[in-house]
Image: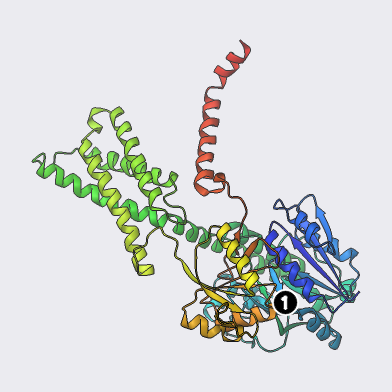
Amino acid sequence: MKLSVIIVNYNVQYFLEQALLSVRKAAARLPVEVFVVDNNSVDESVKMVREKFPEVILIANHDNPGFSKANNQAIRVSRGEYVLLLNPDTVVEEDTFDKCVAFMDAHPEAGGLGVRMIDGSGKFLPESKRGFPSPFVAFCKAFGLSRLFPRSRVFNRYHLGFLDPEETHEVEVLAGAFMLLRRSVLDEIGLLDEAFFMYGEDIDLSYRIVQAGYRNYYFPGTTIIHYKGESTKKGSLNYVRTFYNAMIIFARKHFQGEKARVYILMIQMAIYFRAFLTLLTNWGKRLYLPLLDGGLIFGGLLFLKSFWATYYHQDPDYYQPQFLYFNLPLYLLIWLGSVFFSGGYDAPFDLRRLVRGLLFGTVVLAAVYGFLPLEYRPSRALILLGAAWALLSTVGLRYFMHLLRFGNLNVGKARTHNLVIVGSHSESERVLQLLQRAQVSKNLIGVVAPGATDDQQTYLSSLDRLQEVVYIYRVEEVIFCGQDVPAQSIMHWMTRLGPGIDYKIVPQESLSIIGSSSKNSAGELYTVDIQFNIDTPMARRNKRVVDWLATGFLLLTFPVWIWVVRR
């Protein structure tokens, strides 16, 4: 057996299916065995592998032991001269395995090999080649110096930004998304360290390969797509904690004395720093619109208070001070809270949810107003005027922001992208049916043939003229049919057209269309899965509130229920 391919999967069924289809094509000319280790997924990944890929050796765990343990499970029973650790959210070219194995055969000093990776938008991923995270290198990465000076030999040694990504280089660290290892080297240095649950195990293994006297290579002779961000969201606190704790494990294992203490202290500082930035970013994204709404409504209520007191009551000081410190905050809390629980701040934006929330909030406010003491009931007119202002100001704000961003006033309407499908007539028809069943609206420009064609009625052009089609018709999204277009050709066009286009791939005989617009965003899926109402953020949030209220009620009335049950 020449090559053992090992894929660890956790709840990424559709990406795994696409990865296995690409692996099947790449394994056509080599003796290859393929393992899938599933870490207790709940998305029917195991069922899909058993039904669609009977040649795959499936290891279905009943818990999630982590990335390292899962890989080691398969490595121990594999028989290949080379072992490839491959992420499930990847796509390999048809000749990837041939080229990589040939390179390793020609370089007996090579212990490991990584390849050129692009994200779902066709952009080169800098982690394709990396250096060891020494204390200074880790400091530059954690505090953003490597991003400020991406090509610096001093500040960006983590991603080796000074090395040409189109040339073969000896590197220090291989990426865990595609890690080709020589079996004899693994037998000598040992398997993945199972102290690493996720992240850091690739750095540790790469370090041990170099320490044993072998070399790691970055090989750009083939390219893979790595969608990224599927099993662990990179913008989350969990990612920050998991990644940097893995760096601490690495430091304690390989550094000694003062160097280890300095490194660990630096990493701990980085954890707090990055966690603070993550919290700030996440809360900023969530709160900026409610804060803008609150500011507009608050300012409008102050103006209405002065206006109504002066022109209706003929007394600028008619309203008591408690209106400012009690009534205004109460009105804001009820209106904004109603909008929140109505889904007015959920994406994608829906104008109806905003209006419904404000109207419901006004009804609640009117009801609450009737129970307030007399001195806290300044004027029902201000509630009605305030509700009208809240509606006008918040809706107007959405229109203004939408106009600035998109140049039109189609607020709340999904923007219809100009779409081109690259594939045969039969596959393009299947793609259109998938889009319709998934209720995805697109403006289909036409179909581009995967090869040369004279059929101008069915096709816009052949694939070699795709760039002209994209330019002339202002195409914003391209869907490639995996059955008709080789992965190598897909990656070529993704790289050539650049990240300004949304790219998606429909795997052969699959009910999903897969893509991702950036390296940090979770991959996008158009699927025909059933969507239940409870899956929406508003439904989950409201159910949680009802659960809390019901639990609180039962706890408060527990003595009564005990007495009733005993009776």
The residue positioned 56% from the left and 70% from the top of the image is 518
Spot occupied by residue 504 in the image (x, y as percentages of width and height): 60, 70
Q: Is residue 340 visible?
A: yes
- Tell me the element at label 1: loop
Spot occupied by residue 406 in the image (x, y as percentages of width and height): 38, 68
112 sits to left or right of 438:
right
Q: Is residue 319 above or below residue 89?
A: above
Please give the residue where the numbered disc 1 appears in the rendered image.
173
The residue positioned 38% from the left and 68% from the top of the image is 405
For mark 1, does the 10 Å Cα neighbourhood hold few (<14), some (14 to 19), or many (20 or more) residues? Answer: many
* Residue 480 lies in quadrant: bottom right
The residue positioned 37% from the left and 60% from the top of the image is 411
Work out which quarter of the rendered image holds the C terminus and state it: top right
Spot occupied by residue 148 in the image (x, y as percentages of width and height): 52, 78
Q: Is residue 209 above or below residue 195?
A: below
Number of numbered callouts drawn? 1
